[in-house]
Amino acid sequence: MPLTDTIAKNVKHSGNPAGDKHTDGGGMYLLINHAGRYWRMNYRHAGKQRTLALGVYPVSLARPANGVTARVNCWLRA
């Protein structure tokens, strides 16, 4: 289920030191911790899992553009 602006705005941090991940599909998620809300994307490159920081909520778009995951995957294949 895609995260909407309303969900991203109203979800609360549970107190978990590692933060809470709310997935948006395609490897993207909203990480919520005591310091704020961050858009992240998990991907694999050269057999290793990596995380790409996409921006801070709400300074960045409420949700990064729909094609972000496709563009990142295309960039990784190049």
Image (spheres, rainbow, N blue to C red):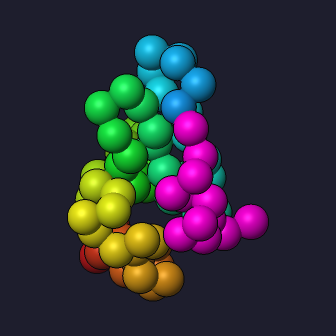
Relative depth, front residue between 1 and 27: 1
Q: Which image quarter holds the C terminus?
A: bottom left
Answer yes or no: is residue 49 visible. Answer: yes
Relative depth, front residue between 34 and 53: 34
User: Where does residue 67 sit, x and y in percent of width and height?
Assistant: 45, 84
Question: Is residue 20 rendered magenta in the image?
Answer: no
Query: Would you place residue 32 above or below residue 26 in this image?
Result: above
Span of residues in magenta: 1-12
Q: Quadrant of residue 61?
A: bottom left
Residue at far right of view: 1
Query: Would you place residue 37 above or below residue 3 in this image?
Result: above
Q: What residue lies at 42% left-to-right and 71% top-to-bottom?
A: 62
Q: Which image quarter holds the N terminus?
A: bottom right
Q: Quadrant of residue 6?
A: bottom right
Q: What residue lies at 46% left-to-right and 42% top-to-bottom?
A: 31
Answer yes or no: is residue 73 visible. Answer: no
Lateral position of residue 35 relative to residue 3, left or right = left
Lateral position of residue 14 relative to residue 40, left or right = right
User: Where does residue 39 sit, x and y in percent of width and height?
Assistant: 39, 55
User: Where does residue 52 sit, x and y in percent of width and height?
Assistant: 31, 52
User: Where does residue 46 sit, x and y in percent of width and height?
Assistant: 36, 48
